[in-house]
Image (tube, coloured by chain):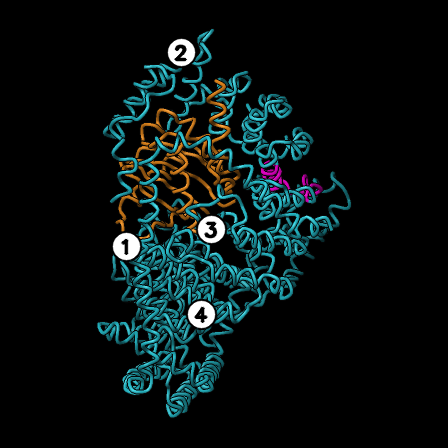
Chain colours: A cyan, B orange
Amino acid sequence: MEQLKTIGRELALSSQVGWGSSKEFLDLVKAIGEAKSKAEEERIIIADIELLRKKIGEPDVPRRKMKEYIIRLVYVEMLGHDASFGYIHAVKMTHDDSLLLKRTGYLATTLFLNEDHSLIILIINTIQKDLRSDNYLVCCAALTAVCRLINEETIPAVLPQIVDLLSHQKEAVRKKAVMALDRFYQRSPSLVSHLIPEIRQKLCDRDPSVMSAALCALFDMITAESEPFKNLTGSLVSILKQVVEHRLPKLYDYHRTPAPFIQIKLLKILALLGSGDKHTSENMYNVLGQILTKGDPSTNIGNAILYECVSTLSAIYPNQKLLQHAAELTAKFLKSENHNSKYMGIDALGRLIKINPECAEDHQLAVIDCLEDPDDTLKRKTLDLLYKMTKSSNVDVIVDRMIGYMRTISDAHYKTDISSRIIELAERYAPSNHWFIQTMNQVFEFAGDLVPAKVAHDLMRLIAEGAGGEDEDADNQLRSSAVESYLQVLGEPKLPSVLLQVICWVLGEYGTADGSHSADYIIGKLCDVAEAHPGDNTVKGYAITAITKICAFEKGAGRKVGLTSECRSLIEELSTSHSTNLQQRAYELQALLGLNDETVATVMPMDASCEDIEVDKSLAFLNAFVKSALEKGARPYLSESERLSIGGITTLASSNNQNDLSHSLRFEAYERPQLPVPSLSSFQPTVVREFEDQRTTNNNLRATYAGHSTSMTDTQLVNTEAASLRLDGIQKKWGRPTYNNTPASSTSSADRGRSAAGNSPAEFSKDEPVESSLKSAVESRYVTSRKQRPEISEEKQKLAASLFGGTFPKSQSSSRSSGSTGKVSKSSHSRSQAPHIGANEQSAQMRSANSSTSIDKGHEKSLPVSQNLATPDLLDLGDGDSAGPSSDPFKQLEGLLEVPSTAMPSKPVIPQQVPDLLSLYESTPSSGSPSINLIG
Amino acid sequence: MAIRFILLVNKQGQTRLAQYYEYLTLDERRALEGEIVRKCLARSDNQCSFVEHRNYKVIYRRYASLFFLVGVDGDENELAILEFIHCVVETMDRYFCNVCELDIMNHLEKAHFILEEMVMNGCILETNKSNILAPIQLMDKSS
């Protein structure tokens, strides 16, 4: 490749001998450069660290030498070793009189230290002095350091001087002063908010660079809050217009494109200002249109601007004409052979579908190509797009794709990301509970412990609550299928802890419910789980509790429970466990087995996980006990607030009193006083514990179990007291308010069916009134695309059909619409998912049938049109050729490289031109409105 | 903030220049550089020049044995950054007259100064090559 030559051919022989560097330094650099491996590099650096340690501290190191040492320190840190022993020398070098050494000192300091480092304080004074320097280059060096080293506390120390520098005569200083203020704004907006008018003023500075710096600063401010800056729109638009019309000096061009980075910054700001604001947006349409038509799609930088323009258009108040243009551009991006352009196209499409969800349909095949591309970046971006266009009709296909992708990756960060997206989509659009459970199982299987515990709890709750009550049969069926699928999953090796917890809980609740599995079988499975995960106490806790439940159900049903030896040994093992939690569970199981059947049936009724447990919060059943205690001379109970109002000493006394009641010694940590503990919790539960009444034990047990099923994450809550403290939370045992949304949507699957049915007629009716011209255009485009790519596989079309819903062929006959709506509405009644899917498949078939007819029709009717449409495609190809857009700039660079010797002599010419061009620019603000607008 | 870091790494994975616009510890930097270079090296020429890594998007461009990598956050125009890299290379090229890896290594501070002029606070501040190089050339003359 050509670009390889750029640096490559010079690699071996350095073009210049280092300007005045010592041989020692050059040798070191050479050695690092020639190191063949990381290990060799490491050795060189470690040797150098030793050397530097000795030498850098010597007295009277020559300043030039010191500069080399500092740069060697930079190398040491850059290659991953600690150079903190030399930081102080870098700080010292900032005091140097020589500009080069000073700037090197500042550079090293910014590379070594973060703004909160303790050495920073030593540098503030130097910065202050340098900001006042007569030499503007010294000012610039100090300002650069300010942007890196000043933290919130030290801002006031330099702020006044920086404000002074805003009106420095040198534009380089003004520019950096603006950036310093920008930095302060990022750190602490309130400290510089009074300077915002000054920064706005800088927009009409006569130097374009200062204006560009002001844009950077304003961008940050407008991102935080756009309202106060709305009145800048006019000025910004006029600046953008001037840039686009090439009225900045040529020196700002990049490959003949006028100041592209300034254009992009402006477009970003306009997008913020125009978002959801019709009036402001209207001011921009003109210039945005200008950019779209003037843009050069043959270069990367031209495409960068066009892309930014598309994303601005999709952010501001929509303008149909311009959006149409944007959609065409996006289509061009997508059709490009260049992967970078495709990537931008997918991104742009993702922005456009927010405004117009239909526009994705024209590009379905391009999207699917990207989805199946081996390029991982492109694939991810496309999955992002699919995520944005998910609806209930295509959720199963999209989630399936995402899971398929998740299976292939190992990067934990992205896995977490994608699994949370899958969960979100599944919760929002799940076509059926059964599907939801299956999907969740897959997520747990592949993303394992990256999934938050909340998701597992939600899933358990869904299985427990089912569709919402009336249809008990369907719920039972759901549970049976869940049990079956989990028994199957258990056969697989290495399951993540979260999934095992869910499995144990479901098996415990419903393993024996439908009678197809014997209690012994389920208990055996649960024992296996516990034994296979000796290190995971949470899973073991779930397993033993599940066994307890199964035993209780058996006993409750009047059957005899004979535990296998395997199970007995498990119980024994757990009752001597180091975890008190597990111990307690094991003992509870044993206690339960000793109770009589009726008691057990009351303590642990069948399928009661959803039932509210009534808690007698006033603990009225204890009245007799309390009364007798009072008669024996015990102090009456005071609520916490009462105790606090009495004052410190009495509080102490009463807490002593409390201790007397429970233990003589307290082992647990003292409660934090500010903790908002409900008043009864601190005192009464201890009484409960003392109270050896069968009834309360029962209550306690039930509470504990309820606690289990709710939040096993809190397994570390070990003692009974903690468990009884939880009585309070039991009413809302599943905790998360968000969960309520899920069952709400899943309970009303009838509703969903209805809405699906409601959707589809809308879609069809939308199709029908399409203007015939547009329709035929779309049709013919479809036809041409078919003709161009005869190799499009059946599979892809199917995928397209299922992803993009019933819109693939635009010429749907009305008969189909009536037919399939009937189908959908029927399925909504039966509330089972099968007919729905059936409808999907059927429509896909119908679609392919229809599409073939539409091709026939299209052939005669719209052949001329299709030729017309084909031309842009040809042009596209031409673009791709002539551009080879990525290689082009390099060639230009080659050109640059070829002539450096000639470029040097021609240099004196440039300064001559500069004032000319600058004056050109200077004249523009006065002709344009910004200065006037701004002051107002 | 847009640009989070700029890295020059050769294809052996050895860092040649590193500029971070947010603070990372030495270990974090080391890990990040290693992982990113591995990812970029595994990609072929006709694939995208963009790679997602953790919460960064990395835009890279290869010149001979040197990778120029720019890490940005969420909402950045990738194509523009790609061209910005080229602008950096052109600027260095003008300063060093045919820049090569060894030039950057021998004059690490100069390469940093060029970047300091072009990027501040993670923003692209200056792409006018005369404006970028003027202060550096003046400094060279004075010393």
The answer to whether marks 1 and 2 mark residues whose Cβ atoms lie closer than 8 Å is no
Compared with A532, A324 (above or below) is below
Give the residue pinned by disc 2.
A55
Element on which disc 2 rests: helix
Q: Main secondary structure of the magenta part?
A: helix
User: Magenta includes A647?
Assistant: no
Give the residue pinned by disc 4.
A462
Give the residue pinned by disc 1.
A494
Task: Choose the circle earlier in sequence order: 4 or 1.
Answer: 4
Stretch of the chain drawn in magenta: A178-196
Residue A684: quarter of image: bottom right
Tell which subunit mark 4 falls on: A
The answer to whether marks 1 and 3 mark residues whose Cβ atoms lie closer than 8 Å is no
> Which label sits in the foreground, 4 or 3?
3
How far is mark 1 from mark 2, CA to CA?
56 Å
Q: Are marks 4 and 2 on the same chain?
A: yes
Q: Are marks 2 and 3 on the same chain?
A: no
Q: Looking at this view, is A748 or A278 the one in front?
A: A278
Give the residue pinned by disc 3.
B76
Element on which disc 4 rests: helix
Compared with A661, A881 (above or below) is below
> Which label sits in the foreground, 2 or 3?
3
Circle 1 residues within 10 Å: few <14, some 14–19, many ≥20: few
How far is mark 4 from mark 3, CA to CA?
40 Å
Residue A208: horizontal and vertical position, in percent? 57, 42
Residue A749: horizontal and vertical position, in percent? 46, 79
Task: Inspect the image, locate mark 1, and give the three-letter code of the amino acid beneath it.
Answer: Lys
Task: Choose the circle earlier in sequence order: 4 or 2.
Answer: 2
